[in-house]
């Protein structure tokens, strides 16, 4: 049976359990309609389209 030789501190345990080091930079794709950058598999916020469909009206800025 495996028995630890010494106590593992809370800091060491929590460092091991954290997933911060696993994160990667987000990849960005260009929208085929307007050319703005967007996250993959998500609606484009500038032209409100996804997969060739329109999902709302674009709000005009002042």
Image (spheres, rainbow, N blue to C red):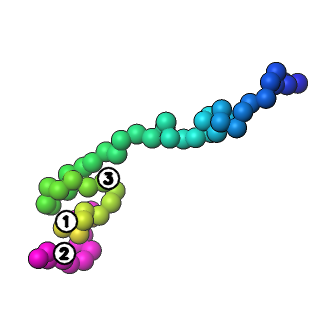
Look at 36% across and 41% down and name the residue there. 25
Mark closer to the observer (3, 2): 2
Q: Residue furthest left?
A: 62
Task: Verify CB contact (< 8 Å) between mark 1 and mark 2.
Answer: yes
Q: What is the magenta range? A: 51-62
Q: Which residue is mark 3?
A: 40
Label placed on residue 22: none
Residue found 40% across the figure and 39% down from its top: 24
Magenta region includes residue 10: no
Q: Is residue 55 left or right of residue 47?
A: right
- The quadrant of the picture occupied by the N terminus is top right
Dot 3 falls on a residue whose secondary structure is loop
- Mark 1 — residue? 46
Mark 1 vs 2, N-terminal side: 1
Q: Residue at x 11, y 76 (%)?
A: 62
Measured as percent of width and height from the top left, residue 54 is found at 23, 72
Location of residue 42 by image quarter: bottom left
Q: Is residue 16 above or below residue 57?
A: above
What's the residue at 15%, 61% (across, down)?
A: 33
Q: Give the foreground label among 1 and 3.
A: 1
Q: Residues within 10 Å of mark 1 (few under 14, many from 20)?
A: some
Residue pointed to by mark 2: 58
């Amino acid at each position: 049976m495996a028995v630890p030789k010494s106590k593992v501190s809370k800091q060491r345990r929590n460092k091991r359990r954290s997933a911060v080091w696993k994160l990667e930079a987000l990849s960005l794709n260009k929208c085929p309609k307007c050319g703005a950058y967007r996250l993959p598999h998500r609606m484009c916020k500038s032209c409100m389209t996804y997969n060739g469909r329109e999902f709302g009206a674009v709000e005009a800025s002042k």
